[in-house]
Amino acid sequence: MDVAPVVALGSNVIRVAMEFWLRRQKSRSEPLDHFLDTEVADPLDRRRLTRRLESLTDTVIAGLSADAGYEQLDEESRTRVVNAVRSALEQASLSPADLMGPGGMEQDRLLAIIKERSHVSLVLEAEQRVYEVLLAKTVAVLLTVVSVLPESSPYVVAELLRNGDEIDGTLRARLSELPAAGGGDDSYRLALVTGLDQAEIVGFTLPAALRRFSLSRTYSRPRVTVEGEDMPVEWALADFPRLYLNGPAGSGKTALLRWLAVDGARKSLDGLLQKHNELLPVYLPGSRLGAAPEEEPRSVTDFVLQYARPSLRESITNDTLDRRAALGEVIFLLDGLDEFGQKQLPRIRHWLTQLVQRYPKCRLVVSSRQAVIDPAVLTDLGFAVASLNQLDDAGVADLATRWFATVGPVVPERVGDRTAVQLGREVVRVVRSSPQLRELATSPLMCTLICGVYLDRGLEWLQGSDIYAAFVEMMIERRDVERGLGRDRLPRSLASIFLEDLAGHMVGNGWTELPDDRVLDRLEHTRSTLTKPAPHPREVLDSLLVESGVLVEPERGRIRFLHLTFQEYLAAQHFLHNDDIELMVERAHELLWRATLVMAVGQARHRQGDRIVRALADRAERDVPRRATLVGVLEECVRSAHRLDPALRDRVDDLRRRLAYEADTDGERWELWLSTADRAVSESLTSWLLREPALRREGGLVFAEGRLGPDRPVPSGMVFCLSLAARGPILIGALVNAVAAWQGSRPSRDRVELALVVPEAGLTIRISPERLPH
């Protein structure tokens, strides 16, 4: 076949993608070549850019030519088909707004736009059939190019010049992952990959390049609990043909179902799931299920065809879908039953029952937030209940590394010379250094957000209380609004009042979980203080459970906050608004109050923060039995405050020094020896241990520089000593684990050896980088 038409088609694809790529830098009326000539004035750079674009065009041509179904046509017919597709693309005159519609980049929507705007006539039926296949393949390639090229920014041309080879390699890899083009379900598989293999962080302000990324490349497979047994998610999907997957907001339910759909469409599932590659994945999002239909489906296949995304109607007939589903050749993925609202539940339950009864051989995976669907509603249909587990340290490291490996090449100016593995280790180190971040990072959504914030705004932004304010705002309102879920919801201001009052009530009583009737009583109390009408407490609770997900129901009739950090943050807001400084200071030695007070100092106005720290310092002076604990809280407050009177900072330092050199009434001090005299290392270790939750018992730890106890032998190879006073019971194992975690979080070039001397036990425990697990 003459290659000229294919080259022209490939060039058109790159031109449309470039228009999208540069959409914020050039007007649409300005010719692309003129813009590039102006933007790249240097003749040598212009030649380099031209070669880069030619290389991308060659990659697109290879992608268009692979599995295009040409072999069934003679050369003349092939040329007519390619020219027809090129003509359709030119006639459609696609704009950036066409590519990025309200629902994102959707292949079926873009295909409909092209067909509506173009007029193509092919006489032969075989040519028309191949035309449909090639047009679908062209749209898939176009959307893949658009998703791979860097997002609009002032550096796009320079980025292409600097990292063109890397972008070309990424594009080549992504195109190779597209399913083969063909008729029937092949077109649907192709649309699934281009339509669903895009993850996006919604509800949080980040640059576009950090908000949208390939789902399949960043996906970290979770673990689930089924019938009390912890297992990899692949085991559950392989063992249970009907699986009800639940978890709180942000736990990765949608990501799991989309990953299963995309890799199933590519036929790239491996291991225990390899047999799933032969099944047709049909994805039905809850946001579509919740839309009121103009006409109720007449059959279960009509229901599937009406709500499947992307559209199945042009790829498979009603009869074919019915036949294949009856044979068990389909896996139905119903994502987010919580997204359509309680009013639609009976209707969806009806159609779910119809699916199970009509197609008993088919596999079904259904997802929902925990508080919305009673598992009993589905277990009678033969569904096993699987709960998504939280991420552990290994899961955080895996997710962070995959995310940086995918996003990093798109924003090299932020990454610098650091590899994805190095960035992943940095995030793990940041997360481990903060009990609050450590708790938040157990959620895949929050972990991904932490990665994005770290790359976009740096370490400092993760160390203040602003990050928790942004996370809570995202959960209360912005996430569902930006996802386009148009259900009724509590206004953000009203939801904040109820949540802050509930959090303050729970912290004030030392509770992290309550029966739902006690929660309803508290919501009624809050409602009675409002001057304007508010919904009934049950409606408020349902809204906070279902819509925002800030509250969760871990078991029937029990309510808690999604993350303890959210409870602490909202309680701090409550106590600040009520100016309950004396109450916070009075209970600062309690673990739950300690974190709340530290967050309050970070959020307080300047003078209000000074009052809290001053009152806490006064209490530390007079409360001798709890002085060690209170000084530790003071040190955390100083670190979290945005502004603080210098005299107060000096007073806190003086308290710490005085306390460290006081006589230890509980016996000989422990000694923590370091193989370096670098003060920054000792300060880093001290800061880490002060924030370690396992060591925050009654009293905690107090540190002093230099030896204070009897003159004992210096452990071999050690240089510097930190004397430790343990006020209250501290487990040696917890301390060793905390030191090992600190050691493992540091860059390898900064690793040091340590020795912990526990005189009353006659122990010397050496902690060496070479002996830590990798």
Image (cartoon, rainbow, N blue to C red):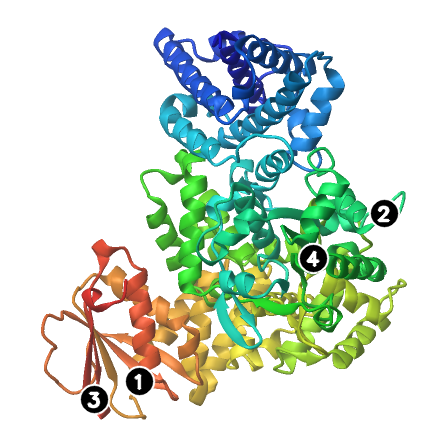
- Of residue 174 and residue 562, the one placed in the foreground of this image is 174
Residue for badge 2: 297
Separation of residues labelled 4 and 1 (CA atoms): 48 Å
Residue for badge 3: 759
Q: Position of residue 282 (x, y in %)?
A: 66, 47
Quarter of the rendering containing residue 370: bottom right
Separation of residues labelled 2 and 4 (CA atoms): 34 Å
How many C-alpha atoms fall within 10 Å of the one at disc 4: few (<14), some, or many (≥20)? Answer: many
Q: Amino acid at mark 3?
A: Pro
Q: Indicate whether 359 appears above or below 75.
A: below
Q: Indicate whether 133 appears above or below 635.
A: above
Separation of residues labelled 2 and 1 (CA atoms): 79 Å
Separation of residues labelled 3 and 2 (CA atoms): 77 Å
* Nearest-to-viewer mark from 3 and 2: 2
Q: What is the secondary structure assignment of the residue under circle 1?
A: loop
Q: What is the secondary structure assignment of the residue under circle 3?
A: helix
Residue for badge 1: 662
Q: Amino acid at mark 2?
A: Pro
Answer whether residue 442 is visible to the viewer in this image: no
- Of residue 540 and residue 727, the one placed in the foreground of this image is 540
